[in-house]
Image (cartoon, grey):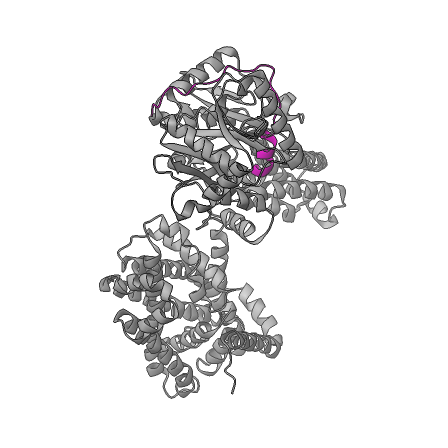
Amino acid sequence: MRKISRPWLSSALAVLMLALGLFFIRSEGPVLKQALVAFGEAPLIPTLLAALVTGLYVLFSARMYVDGFAATGARVPLGEAVRLWLRRNFISVFLPAGGVSSMAFFNRSLRRHGLDDRRLYLGSLVYFLAGYSSLLLITVPALLFGMGTLLSGYALLGPVGAFVLLLAAGAGYVCSFRRKGWAYTRLVRKFPRAAAQLEDLRTQPLDRRAIARAVLASVGVELCGVAHVWLAVLAMHGSSLSLSTAFVGYVTATLLLAFSPALRGLGAVELSLTLVLTRVGQVPETAAVAATLFYRIFEFWLPLLLGLGSFFWQRTNLLLRVAPAFLTLLLGLLNLLSALTPALTYRVRLLKEFLPIDLLQLSNGLVIAAGGLLVILSVGLLRGYRSAWVSTVVLVGLSMVAHLTKAIDYEEALFAAFVLLVLWYTGAQYRLASPPVKRLVRLRPSALRVPPDEETYGTARQLTEQHGHSALDYFKLYDDKELFLLPDRTGFFAYRRSVRLAVVLEGPVLARYDRFPEALKIFETDCRMRGRQVLYYRVDEQDLPFFEAIGRKPLQIGQEGIVHLDKFTLEGRDRKSLRNALKRVQSAGYQTHTYEPPLSGRLAQQLRAVSDEWLRTEELRETAFAQGVFNAGEIKHQPVVTVEDEEGKVVAFANIIPNFAPEEGTYDLIRKTDDAPSGVMDALMVGLITYLQKQGKRRMNLGLAPLSGLTEPGAFPEQALKLVYDRTTVFTHFKGLRFFKEKFADEWQTKYLVYGDDLDLMQAAVAIQRVSRYLPGDTLRPPLRAESTVV
């Protein structure tokens, strides 16, 4: 006989639960309408008490997580645990195996509190077992209280027995694993590569007192459920329910919920609880159905809505960034529609008894004017302008009043009140000053650029030469950048504008590194006053705490390869491919040469010819911002490594630029002709390494390999980037670049894009592409010299 697979079994159970739900709706159809009417007339006090019990239910559930992780020696704040439970509870509704599956989600925030994977798994396991243990603890009293009744006795023995056996099997499996019994042996055999991790899990000490507290908190969760059943009958029937029946009703519903593979027993719970209330509690059918709806509202749907809301608690969330603008646009259109359509006659007649006709007409005109202005202001809200937010708040408030005074349109007034509430909640994100009118005109990137004056450039140049510490500092003084000099002239930022975004290359160059936080605040304030949002491109990992302290978010965008020059050698098995590439190049009659500046005019012309052919063959155009462009006047002042044939024709070259990181060298352009021999790029890299070794450098920076190194993506944007990078051919070129650099790299340094909110992130790719377009400046700056290794 063929064994039924688990997916088929889960699907069958889910279909059965839904069938029970449809049966409930069909069988209780006429009564359901009456129950809905009764539910709408629920008394205030039991409703408020039920809401309070829901709050306790959430807190007890979160406390289970706190104590579960405390059992492993970790400390998780209660607020963090509340958010974790709300989110996991929300997605468990839609996942197979419900709450068990949800424990694999939302672990990133927990890692910030020092939880490694071992503690995450064990803490979640303690939570899981505590929940089922507490259910068993209240199931036994329910059986004792209701023994002899139709549903509470023998009818419950079957599901309760199955539940007890399942819990006992789970506890036995855990004990066997902890004692290195058959469970441990079987797991090691099945997953031999995970043997070390399994051993770590087995030997992790657990605090028994914390486990006991988790079970106690879980009992509190169950008692909240019993209280919800009792309050539901009190609200819908007007009389109290016996404690035994409340226990039986809750246990019956929860057992079905526990065995439900998805949708948390939707339908089956309603049917079973209604039967318990009618047959055991002697509650009239209409009141029983209404009580069941009341129970599910506060036990299931309200926590579910709170879980949905937990995803939007952060005010920089994309939805909360877009929602106010969308709602304002919608209210503006609603205003226009409401003012231009006839009002309800009886409302106008009633209003005329209290207000003069002129005021009604004035209110109607005000609604029209506010509607048109709100449509326009929605654009300013989307861009984050503070003045647009203030104006919108005033107009929405006026609209709310005007709708009431023009025709008692309370529906429109309530919607305006809701929009006003959303605006108040999200008000902190509107910090940008409105730009001058002349800057509202859409301009080309070249028109946006304001070249620094000679004094500013001279100060920035001096700061870079004396205090630069990065391989990217050289490009901060490229003529495609604007410079922001700190008021005391002890540091500067280099950036380019893309409409309303200022894209900063890395971080600031500072005379004192400890002034990093202060410099950030000064620059951000200036950009905010000019109506600009800020992106920071290719930020070092060590600088992230400064950005996170001001509410900025990081996104991993790739890694820079580093060669340890003092350890590099062509010997060994790992370098066999390099040796073979060099032999092929040399046997074809090509040699590597090094030229010190100043370069001859003839050599510069050859380099230009190679560069132009490379751009033409690859169908590329020069890009700048975080890299250089070919400039004959500039490259004459830089060391160059070439690969040439026997007649002295250059077929590949790389230029070495100043690198302000201590004891580190780097190159900029690395280009070749179409007919260059196979392996020429490997030969060129070896020539660069040899040259830098002779210069006494200890490291060589290979530059960025975009999107590489995303081994453990955190936030959703990083997960999406990794998925596209791994599963598609869109970034094949980036993969090839990573493969090439891995031949030489001994170390990888992660780089980040730092942004403010999700809306800025959506515009980041376009903004970086725009600022990377090279637009030649009017003058050629003198070459920089890396003379210092300060900081």
Dividing the picture into quarters, in which one does residue 166 lie? bottom left
Instruction: Check if residue 782 falls in the magenta segment.
Output: yes
Q: Is residue 398 left or right of residue 59?
A: right
Q: Does the image show residue 232?
A: yes
Residue 495 or residue 64, whichever sits in front? 495
Q: Does the image show residue 619?
A: no
Residue 735: image location, x then y, percent: 53, 46
Dividing the picture into quarters, in which one does residue 386 lie? top right
Residue 221 in the image: above or below residue 706: below
Residue 269 in the image: above or below residue 482: below
Residue 586 or residue 165, whichever sits in front? 586
Instruction: Check if residue 155 falls in the magenta segment.
Output: no
Q: Which residues are magenta?
A: 764-791
Indicate the quadrant containing the C terminus: top left, top right, bottom left or bottom right: top left
Residue 437: image location, x then y, percent: 64, 22
Residue drawn at the location 36% of the way across and 28% of the way down: 663
Residue drawn at the location 39% of the way across and 70% of the way down: 190
Residue 88 in the image: above or below residue 576: below
